[in-house]
Image (spheres, rainbow, N blue to C red):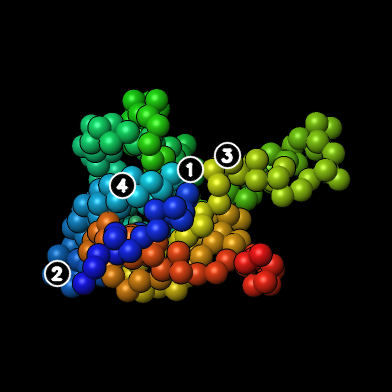
Amino acid sequence: MESFRNRLDTKKVPKHVAIIMDGNGRWAEQHGSSRIMGHEHGVESVRSAVEGAGEIGIRHLTLYAFSTENWERPKAEVDALMSLFVQAIENETDKLMKNNVRLSAIGNIAAMPADVKANLDRCIDRLKENTGLNLILALSYSGQWDIINAVKQIAAEAANQQLDPEKINNEVFRKHLSTSGIPDPELLIRTSGEYRISNFLLWEIAYTELYFMPKLWPDFRKEDLFEAVVDYQNRERRFGKTREQITN
Ligand code: IPE
Ligand code: IPE
Ligand code: MG
């Protein structure tokens, strides 16, 4: 069968793809290993997704790596995930550099352990001049956290009379989100067969195309990304309008 890579319309590649990387625990269970092992195997999937995104010219790839709610997991798992972040960021920086990838992070990064933060800052700084794919890691992130943060800033500006409440609109609001300056994702992928958003980009996905796949994250490879993009390319995005308006 022809690969999805070949079926892709290179002129209609989404600028921003977001992924909820889910199913590491179930993958581990199926392979008779610990949840931590599942997370470790997920790193290869990240590598493949990043490579694939770069190859087809996606500009921004946002990966949900750790949610606000994930802090509630058993301490041993949280600690292992934090060590894995430090390790993965360190090990992957050379390759990201070679592939011209820029790195950024969204979420409550201040809540991350100092070594994760230091590693992340160092890596972001090293890759900051790169002009290829912008890889965005969502860490200690939740959509509601981000919205509340934006509201706090807007309320403070209004209280200082820097902002007239009457002037608050979509554009003003989105400037206060951590995703400010990044176009909304055209496509959101979730692995592991769960049909939910789990507090990921809430404001930004207002008109995003959703793609759910049964595969567990450690089994995900770039060809799965291409398959999702091909599916996306065959959809009609109407943004509330009629088909006639869209096609004319
Ligand atoms: C996703 O896999 C990784 C994180 C949330 C950090 P899970 O750990 O949620 O795997 P399942 O959903 O339990 O299989
Ligand atoms: C969402 O996965 C968070 C990440 C992928 C980082 P979860 O596994 O935490 O989501 P729920 O609990 O199934 O909704
Ligand atoms: Mg999960």
Q: Earlier in the sequence, mark 1 or mark 4?
A: 4
Q: Looking at the image, is mark 1 or mark 2 earlier in the sequence?
A: 2
Q: Give the mark count.
A: 4
Local packing at callout 4 (Cα closer than 10 Å; few below 14, some 14-19, many 20+) is: some
Which element type, helix, strand or loop, lies under badge 2?
loop
Q: Could you classify mark 3 by the number of other residues whose Cα lies within 10 Å: few (under 14), some (14-19), or many (20 or more)?
A: few
Label 1: how many Cα within 10 Å (few below 14, some 14–19, many 20+):
some
Q: CA distance from mark 1 to mark 2?
A: 32 Å
> Which quarter of the rendered picture does the N terminus lie within?
bottom left
Q: For marks 1 and 4, give the one nearer the viewer.
A: 4
Q: Residue at x 13, y 70 (%)?
A: 32
Q: Earlier in the sequence, mark 3 or mark 1?
A: 1
Q: CA distance from mark 1 to mark 4?
A: 24 Å
Q: Secondary structure at mark 3?
A: loop
Residue topped by disc 2: 31
Residue that badge 1 annotates: 106
Q: Which residue is mark 4?
A: 55
The front one of 234 and 226 is 234
Kindly indicate the quadrant of the structure image that contains residue 230.
Answer: bottom left
Q: Nearer the viewer, mark 3 or mark 2?
A: 3
Q: Which element is circle 4 on?
A: helix
Viewer-side label of 4, 2: 4
Note whether residue 36 is visible: no
Q: Which mark, residue 118?
A: none
Q: Quadrant of the C terminus?
A: bottom right
Q: Which residue is mark 3?
A: 181
Q: Earlier in the sequence, mark 3 or mark 2?
A: 2
Image quarter for ligand 1: bottom left
Which residue is rendered at x = 46% and y = 61% of the image?
Answer: 188
Q: In the image, is 166 to the left or to the right of 132? A: right
In the picture, measured across the screen, residue 203 lies left or right of residue 125, that is right
